[in-house]
Amino acid sequence: MKKMQKGFSLVELLVVVAIIGVLAGVGIVGYSSYTDSAKKRVSLANYNSVKRFIETELTLLNNNIQTTSGAINVFATNCAGSTAAYNSTTVAHKKIQLFLNGAVCYFDTAGYGNVFKNPFSPAGVSQVVYNQVVVAATTPIKGSINIAYLLAADVTAGRSGITAASITDGTSASVDHTAVDDQTKGWFIIEYYTADGVRGTAGEEKGKMFELK
């Protein structure tokens, strides 16, 4: 007489499927949390690298240790065209606009230095951006490192957590970059965006002021 083989019941199969579903759900949540944490670590590491890079360049240029930057090239509006090095002794090259654009282009995806792509951007856009402002709480996008002009009103408002009594340059009462003579030097800020249109204000995410003399 042939012995019948017993299989799994429908209830048993449903229990197994349910257990697999729970484990998969937990795994997906854990993986998502891990990837977000990794992206944040990378983006903040890039932020610190940008600040150190700018600090080094300004130390050399502001103290006349060197007059021509070995890293920053001159770009007026984009990251294509000019390959001339930033020269702090040439009047035309002393404009803060050229210095900031050149610094941004150094890290741009179409630039010539260390390419920093935004870990939070599916399109892989450049993480370092030039003089952007918050527009409808959507830009700059999360993870962006914004190198921007710093106005007196920004300091008063404590933009990105910065605090300072004054940002006058000693020769002019205005540092708002509205006149040509005020564009040859002045203060600027490097800031990090913790979310779309949201500036970091504390800890590693706090903004930092710099002066081009």
Image: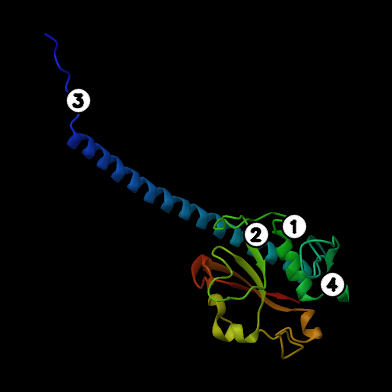
**In this rendering, the label closer to the viewer, 4 or 1:** 1
The CA span between labels 1 and 2 is 10 Å
Element marked by disc 2? loop
Residue lying at 59% horizontally and 83% vertically, measured from the top left = 155
Could you tell which of marks 2 and 3 lies nearer the N-terminus?
3
Left or right of 10 on screen, residue 160: right
Name the residue carrying label 2.
Answer: 126
Element marked by disc 3? loop
Name the residue carrying label 3.
Answer: 7
Numbered disc total:
4
Could you tell which of marks 1 and 2 lies nearer the N-terminus?
1
The image shows residue 97 at horizontal and vertical percentages of 76, 74
Disc 1 crowd, CA 10 A, few/some/many (<14, 14-19, 20+): some
Instruction: Name which quarter of the figure residue 95 lies in.
Output: bottom right
Left or right of 159 on screen, residue 83: right
Name the residue carrying label 1.
Answer: 111
| Residues tagged 1 and 2 counted as in contact (Cβ below 8 A) | yes
Disc 4 crowd, CA 10 A, few/some/many (<14, 14-19, 20+): many
The CA span between labels 2 and 3 is 57 Å
Check disc 1 and give the amino acid type.
Gly
The CA span between labels 3 and 4 is 82 Å
Could you tell which of marks 4 and 1 lies nearer the N-terminus?
4
Check disc 3 and give the amino acid type.
Gly
The image shows residue 115 at horizontal and vertical percentages of 68, 54
Q: Quadrant of the C terminus?
A: bottom right
Name the residue carrying label 4.
Answer: 93
Residue lying at 73% horizontally and 65% vertically, measured from the top left = 103
Find the residue positioned furthest to the bottom: 173
Element marked by disc 1? loop
Between residue 55 and residue 34, name the one nearer to us. Answer: 34
**In this rendering, the label closer to the viewer, 4 or 2:** 2
